[in-house]
Image: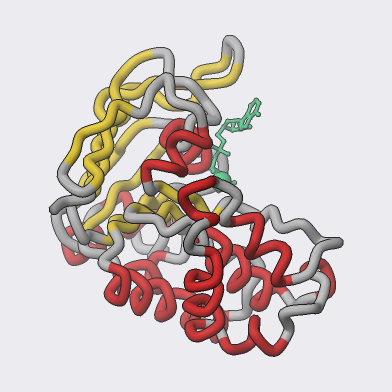
Amino acid sequence: MGNSLSIENVSAGYGSVTVLSDVSVHAGDGETVVLLGTNGNGKTTLMRCITGQVVPSRGTIVAEIDGERHNLIGLSTEEIVDLGISLVPEGRRLFPRLTVEENLTLGAYRQSARERIAASMDFCFEVFPRLKERRTQLAGSMSGGEQQMLALARALMASPKILLIDEPSVGLAPILVARMIDKIAELKTALGLTVMMAEQNFEQAARIANRGYVLVHGQVAFAADSVDDLRNSDVVRRLYLGVG
Ligand SMILES: Nc1ncnc2c1ncn2[C@@H]1O[C@H](COP(=O)(O)OP(=O)(O)OP(=O)(O)O)[C@@H](O)[C@H]1O
Ligand SMILES: [Mg+2]
């Protein structure tokens, strides 16, 4: 049964400032979709609309979870997490003074996830052995790469069907970016996830994405049915590949 996400004609902003205008993006069951866009073009705002942190002024956001449709607008962030939609937020947002294990436990704060907490933690430690070694270390004292692993693992503790990832590569050395992208692909396959990822590192995102969109000034400037279409688009060549 399918897990998909459909954002249709969404406009949203902060106070009187409009950030997103008439944005429509879709992630089909089992797809990895990348949202490209340079700084300040609305990627994080779109993630916040999906997770109920920003309420759109117009448009619809519908998630299909195990084949059942849910209208997300008007739901709280907690209700959206309960449905099976987790966000790895921009800047990780870990609790720096809590340990690895405590941060993971907080990822399973909802009742439904708490019942599976031991199994979820075992899974995270299997996927990220480094986190197991450092289970009692304070999150704030870990390296940037370790913190990004922890942020990803924490999102998995809620047993998501749809995983939203906001710029996983920020602040990581190139080799770690590649490893993080590989890990996302591995998890997607192992857990049958549908993934929507905001990213500015086009080449790395392109390795695992099926399709993508380019946001410019809060609008979809280009919607591509394949990574090749993205790569060949004028807007990607201009903004990401330094051509033209
Ligand atoms: N809480 C807020 N209040 C007011 N304006 C905001 C708020 N958050 C973001 N904005 C504005 O909304 C616009 C889009 O920001 P957003 O964070 O969605 O962009 P982004 O594509 O994620 O950028 P980046 O790549 O730098 O993370 C920016 O002009 C930003 O200043
Ligand atoms: Mg952002």
Q: Where residue 75 sits in the image (x, y, percent)?
A: 44, 25
Q: Is residue 45 visible?
A: no
For the point 37% across and 42% down, the residue is 83
Q: Which residue is drawn at 42% across and 19% down?
A: 74
From the top left corner, tell me how far across and down residue 179 is, in percent. Answer: 49, 83
In the displayed structure, would residue 135 be above or below residue 224?
below
Instruction: Answer with left or right where residue 47 lies relative to residue 106.
Output: left
Where, by quadrant of the figure, is residue 97 drawn?
A: bottom right
Q: Assign the C terminus to one quadrant of the image.
A: bottom left
Residue most toward the top?
16
Residue drawn 69% across the image and 62% down it: 103
**Above/below status of 89 relative to 242:** above
Residue 71: where, in percent of width, then height?
Answer: 29, 26
Q: Quadrant of residue 195?
A: bottom left
Task: Specify whether 7 is left or right of 238.
Answer: left
- Residue 189 higher or lower than 243, as above or below: below
Q: In this view, does 135 lie to the left or right of 50?
A: right
- Please name whichever residue, 243 or 53, is drawn nearer the observer in this view of the structure: 53
How many marks can you see?
A: 0
| Residue in the image at 72% along x and 71% along y | 100
Depicted 40 relative to depicted 35: above or below: above
Q: Can residue 50 be seen in this snapshot?
A: yes
**Protein image colouring:** secondary structure
Q: Nearer the viewer, residue 22 or 230?
A: 22
Find residue 9 and report its horizontal and vertical position in percent.
Answer: 27, 23
